[in-house]
Image (cartoon, grey):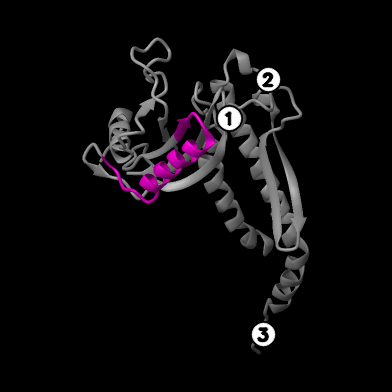
Amino acid sequence: MTAPALDTRDHVAALTAALAHPELPVFEYGEVPGLNGNPGSTPDQYVLLQVERRTVPNVRMVGLASRTGWRITVRPVAPDATRCRWALNHVSTRLEGCTLSVGGFDSIPLQHETTDSVTPDEGLFSAVARWTYSL
Amino acid sequence: MVRVTHGIGDLAGDMAGVTRKARPAMVKVTMANARSGARVAAGFAKESAGRHGRHYPKSITAELLSVAFGSIVAAYGPDASKKQGGMSFEGGSRNQPAHNDLAKSQDIVGPAFAADVHDIPGRLFW
């Protein structure tokens, strides 16, 4: 069996669906409307999502891996601390223990790694939280 | 004539020595893994920090924080007193993705540290 679900785009799609909320759109860095030359207007509040493959110790003698490990970094952004805390709570509630279906494979429940508190961020407020999972 | 010998005396001696050797062994393993974590994290940081963060990898150091009864604590990470040690590369910002250099290092060092701790008791008896 080869390493499953290698396309990060599939992971982003699954996570975006898991986090769906009419008032809290999800973007990857560089894709926020109104920023970095993107068309449209910047939402009041939004979530930035990073998906990275991570090392999973391979106990086999050959180089093949039958599972892949992933780390997601989620950054809610809002104009004030109160709304940012609400956004962080929304993200945490949706992701804690969530299982994802990616590329036909089901993940283990997402495991929380770290959360940094809401802090000022270049004129707005943001927090950052990380989860890991494998499938 | 049947001669019977035993190593119970040796075992008794080893066990008496364990209480003397255990803590230094644990401190050594803990610090070795903290230094290893710092090296691995600095390696990731060299790739991710770019030219504007070229001093940041060297700011990642390890230190022993506490050797108290029942607990040995070491830490590694960017030292804010060193050049660029206070920069926010790890967590990023709304305009800069998180580099996650420390987090990535923990993926490697965490299991290695657990294995090293597991090996300590066996080494104490040899």
> In the rendered view, would you say B36 is above or below A77?
below
- Mark 2: which secondary structure? loop
Question: Which quadrant of the rendered structure holds the C terminus of chain A?
Answer: top left
Q: Which residue is mark 1?
A: A120
Q: Are marks 3 and 1 in contact (CB under 8 Å)?
A: no
What is the span of residues highlighted in magenta in the rendered image?
A74-101
Instruction: Name the kind of residue labelled 1 in the image.
Output: Pro
Q: Which mark is residue A91?
A: none
Residue lying at the far top in this picture: please name it: A37
Which label lies toward us, 2 or 1?
A: 1
- Mark 3: which secondary structure? loop
Which chain letter matches label 1?
Answer: A
> In the rendered view, would you say B16 is above or below B24?
below
How far across and how far down the image is residue B105, in percent? 55, 37
Instruction: Name the kind of residue labelled 3 in the image.
Output: Arg
Name the residue located 49 percent from the left edge and 41 percent from the top edge: A85
Q: CA distance from mark 2 to mark 3?
A: 69 Å
Which chain letter matches label 2?
Answer: B
How far across and how far down the image is residue A47, in percent? 41, 31
Q: Which residue is mark 2?
A: B55
